[in-house]
Amino acid sequence: SVRYKTQLCVTRRLAERNDFVLFLFTLMTNKKTFLQTATLIEDILGVKKEMIQLDDIPNLASLVSSFDQQQLANFCRILAVTISELDTGSDDKHTLLAKNAQQKKNLGPSRAEINQATLLNIPGFIERLCKLATRKVSETTGTSSFLQELEEWYTWLDNALVLDALMRVANEEAEQKSSDESGLANTSTRTQLPQSMKIMHEIMYKLEVLYVLCVLLMGRQRNQVHKMIAEFRLIPGLNNLFDKLIWRKHSASALVLHGHNQNCDCSPDITLKIQFLRLLQSFSDHHENKYLLLNSQELNELSAISHKANIPEVDAVVNTDRSLVCDGKRGLLTRLLQVMKKEPAESSFRFWQARAVESFLRGTTSYADQMFLLKRGLLEHILYCIVDSECKSRDVLQSYFDLLGELMKFNIDAFKRFNKYINTDEKFQIFLNQINSSLVDSNMLVRCITLSLDRFENQSDAKVAEVLSECRLLSYMSQMSMRMSFLFRLINIIHVQTLTQENVSCLNTSLVILMLARRKEKLPFYLRTLQQMEYTEKYPGFILNNFHSLLRFWQQHYLNKDKDSTCLENSSCISFTYWKETVSILLSPDRTSPCAIVSYIDEAYMDIDRDFSEE
């Protein structure tokens, strides 16, 4: 403990010397001191209060180009610190109020964003990362000796842990061989250990590389990064590694850390899978390159679905460069669906798998994309997890509800499949209980059902009419009392001071319900019913005052010139102009207006003028 505190104190003192930190980078040109230098830099950056600027590193481009692939992978550990936004560590700072206030202070790009741009300007940098991420274990350079590999492991793990892991592998392999090849056990172990090391090396390298690519995909230069990683065939390369490395079956001798097991979230195998799924999520989210996750036959299937439904093909499908899509019998998305359906109920992957698939569906709703996934049994799998296994994890439930919403939105076939699976009152009640157990988690599905019901009611198709009359879910949401119950609770569970990226969707879902009411000229009825519900609950003015504040914040948040409103438009198929108009009408100060919130708050309970931004 004393030794650790002394080391930490020394590291902090060194971190204060910016010139010293930059000097350390020059020592990385020496292969003999590279690993020790990289470890020291990583320790220093971990405690440094201000992020360094990569531009300040002398001859950065030539330094990076001098690295071999293993050094570049290790260097990614340092880069990860320099391109990630610093986490404040306080929940309060994650509220939208705090984020908006911080954005007003920081008018220019952050240091992390500047560093991301610096990396993209290094010639060949992204190409080398893609090669590292997609190379097979057999392609790694065979020049490293066993001792060199062990030395690199030493930089990652405590020496005792490495030896312990190696000894356990040796013992397992020796025991496995002893029954029929007892005389050759030791020789066999010595020849197999380096391969075990190489596999784990490659997993550790890919972890760092995928993390850097993932951060860059979420940055300001997202489109530039997308273009490059598509050109360098990252997705087909990962598809080829899927079975043998990324989602490989564990062998009895798989290397794991001391005190952990192969299913532990801390193990490199598990971490690689999660990082891989996060990359897929970032890659697919609202970007036309998502179709690179398919192979040529699967793209043809999407076209066939559109032709059969007599709807135009999605432009992005038509324009996808077939030379950059996945190879083999299955694309990456299909492979992901296969492992997703086999995942155990308690698996930590369920959340990330659902998020990755949902990101493929996000954006403008595509009937062909939905049918592609419906044909592969995705809806039934989700309903099994929600209803039959009665999933208890809030995170996993939220990811399933969000995915279900994207999968079913405006799709009459999906609602028909839903009704076929949820075919008893008992099953339907379990489903409703899961929805009602946490509206923050399920509100996106509530929004999907509300929007879909509105569209179906305005269609004259016989098939739609049949499903409308038979589907339990649509019948349930068609009841005014149910919609009002959802609206009342959605407004009640959020407040301006507690709004986050996580729960602001509740505000937008409540707005969707009221926009659809406005279209049918029923907005006054909804507001009057909310007022009556307040009095029933013995809290006159409580809900409507809160909603008024929330809508004022909505204007401040979404009418910001830097805010992208296309997500709201795409997810609802309602123009952003109509969103803005509805909010303005609701916030009208005219107490004689039948569509203004203030008309339904008695003056004795009026509390709408607070400056929430200063609370």
Image (cartoon, rainbow, N blue to C red):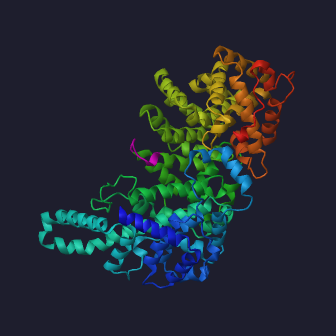
Residue 322 in the figure: left or right of residue 148: right
Foreground pick, 233 / 52: 52
Place of residue 481 in the rendered image (x, y in percent of width and height, measured from the top left): 65, 18
Residue 230 in the figure: left or right of residue 211: right
User: What residue appears at the point 52 percent right and 62 percent down from the top-left corner?
Assistant: 211
Foreground pick, 265 / 512: 265
Residue 591 in the figure: left or right of residue 359: right
**Residue 346 within the magenta-colored segment of the rendering:** yes
**Residue 284 within the magenta-colored segment of the rendering:** no
Query: Residue 552 occupies which quadrant of the picture?
Result: top right
**Quadrant where the C terminus lies?**
top right
Residue 145 in the figure: left or right of residue 274: left
**Quadrant where the N terminus lies?**
bottom left
Q: Is residue 283 above or below residue 73?
A: above
Place of residue 13 in the rendered image (x, y in percent of width and height, measured from the top left): 51, 70
User: What residue appears at the point 40 percent right and 71 percent down from the top-left corner?
Assistant: 137
Q: How many marks?
A: 0
Place of residue 287 in the rendered image (x, y in percent of width and height, measured from the top left): 66, 55
For the magenta stretch, what is the residue range? 344-350
Foreground pick, 97 / 156: 97
Query: Residue 194 occupies which quadrant of the picture?
Result: bottom left
Place of residue 15 in the rendered image (x, y in percent of width and height, measured from the top left): 53, 70
Q: Is residue 520 visible?
A: no
Q: Is residue 129 above or below residue 515?
A: below
